Image (spheres, helix red, strand yellow):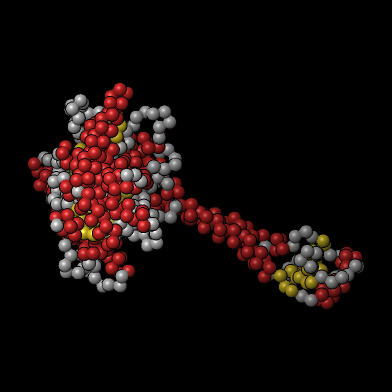
Amino acid sequence: MQEVKKPKKPLIFYYVVVLLILMLINFLAVPWIAQRRIKSVDYGTFMEMTEQKEIGQVQVQEQENQIIFTDKDNTAVYKTGMMPDPELTERLYEAGAQFEGEIIQQTDPLLAFLLSWVVPIVIFVALGQYMSKKMMKNAGGPNAMMFGMGKSNAKVYVKSSEGIRFADVAGEDEAKENLSEIVEYLHNPGKYKEIGASMPKGILLVGPPGTGKTMLAKAVAGEANVPFFSMSGSEFVEMFVGMGASKVRDLFKQAKEKAPCIVFIDEIDAIGQKRDGRIGGNDEREQTLNQLLTEMDGFEGNTGVIILAATNRPESLDPALTRPGRFDRRVPVELPDLKGREEILKVHARKIRLNDQVDFGKVARMASGASGAELANIVNEAALRAVRSGRRYVTQADLEESIEVVIAGYQKKNAILTDQEKITVAYHEIGHALVAAKQTNSAPVQKITIVPRTSGALGYTMQVEEGNHYLVSQEELENKIATLAGGRAAEEVVFQSASTGASNDIEQATKLARAMITRYGMSKDFDMVALETVNNQYLGSDTSLACSAETQAEIDRQVVELVKRQHEKAIQILMENREKLDQLARYLYDRETITGDEFMDILNQ
Ligand code: ADP
């Protein structure tokens, strides 16, 4: 969509321009006009006029090294250069000259008056008239805001044929279905009014970052062919209290004029946070929120203004904002599932030139947990990689490598590992893969590599889920912990020592074990009691404990026990398969990267 409205220059800009023009007139034009009226003559003429007593007024300007004088009747002004002449004053006195302070200014008082008083006043009055007319037209009233402050500055997109459509947003079928009702309403409001149904005034799009919330809002506007006002929540909050509220008023006024239209407020949590009355609370934010609440109450349900807002922290929103009559509909925009990922990849792959044999299904399986924005990034990384290696098409390998770049960073070209380090990393990675493969329920291994990455990983084992997983059993979780422990277990089995390489595995294993006990009710002692709550559903798994100190100690004890049990299981598996472990680690050490198939072949020999 094209943007049609640029932010206007503030009024102060015009005043400064006028002031500059006036200063130019006063400093340059006035002296110039005065100078032009002065006739230059030589010193001889001056002497002659003095002798013949034809001189009226005289002014000696020593600094400029010149003498300015008039004729007897003070009608013409002359100037001449100065000469060393000690008796000049005496002779002038004898000639009857009058010694005046300022000859030039006296030359034309009317012109000077006109230039320095009348012209500026006329300019200011004209400008004032022009601006007030313009503001009345824009703001619809004489009390428009000074200096452009308090204007919403919302970006306005108008209907355009190449706007984003629902077809551009892959996956997210439920959200699209929900929003298409809005489109239908904007196309044909009469149908709804007839029955007496009114559209929700506000719709809240909630979901993790990068899942296409902004895109969906634009697509609604594109499909409905109506103007689209877009503003971010943080743009409302200003340094001065009251400015944000005034911006909200302005935005709604503009929207009502353009109705039917869509107003989109991104990151609404910036203004819509709970007003919890904390000391030192943010006055400006609260006023802005209050204004938003009032405006949303103020317009009727059927005016044709639909407000869409996006946030990834729905739980932090003020309850007054989410009550029926304001944002009364909530559309979840979740991370895409396997099919969704494949579709998103295909949508973005339309823009790049592809080799025929690309298997999007496989790429989508590898990129489990990726958001739409990450998938778009993966496709772009792949295209960049193809250009870098001088090819004209993007291949499957490009896409797979770019997933690894997004997960683990670029390959480190000049990281030099010692032989001992390299063999340790090889055993560590094979340890993970072997434990995963030997536990029947673990996902098969896709790829194992010991090429260091810029993220700091010295190697990694990529596991790929075959389909969508919505439920995970206790056994699967335990196996996962065992797989994570597999790396360290292999080091212990082979070298009887531990290294720092397992820090990330340890962190993940602990998190899983803790969640099993405190949130999933998978421990005997605590039964189905929630001991921990998740603070934010969409932004990382931030949790807070809700239990007594004794219970906390007991949780810690159980977490340790759980992880220990799985660690021992991993050691057990590796000891039983010691031969395969050595064989595979050696193979990986030689090749640096092996595929899942190669791994399974050796394992099943
Ligand atoms: P959000 O507002 O949820 O943070 P955006 O709508 O800004 O995310 O999405 C960012 C980018 O990610 C989009 O420009 C688009 O390229 C890509 N994207 C996200 N979701 C999808 C999707 N479902 N289909 C196609 N592209 C998507």
Where residue 479 appears, as percent x and y from the top left, is 19, 42
Please report the residue visible at 35 percent of the width from the left and 46 percent of the height from the top. Answer: 499
Where residue 530 appears, as percent x and y from the top left, is 22, 28
Against 402, residue 242 (above or below) is above
Please report the residue visible at 36 percent of the width from the left and 50 percent of the height from the top. Answer: 153
Please report the residue visible at 88 percent of the width from the left and 70 percent of the height from the top. Answer: 85
Where residue 338 appears, as percent x and y from the top left, is 16, 52
Q: Nearer the viewer, residue 387 or 148?
A: 387
Against 296, residue 162 (above or below) is below
Where residue 378 appears, as percent x and y from the top left, is 26, 58
Q: Quadrant of the C terminus?
A: bottom left
Please report the residue visible at 72 percent of the width from the left and 73 percent of the height from the top. Answer: 39
Q: Let me know if residue 438 appears in the view.
A: yes
Number of callouts: 0
Q: Which quadrant would residue 196 be assigned to in this image? A: top left
Q: Nearer the viewer, residue 367 or 215?
A: 367
Q: Let me know if residue 211 appears in the view.
A: no
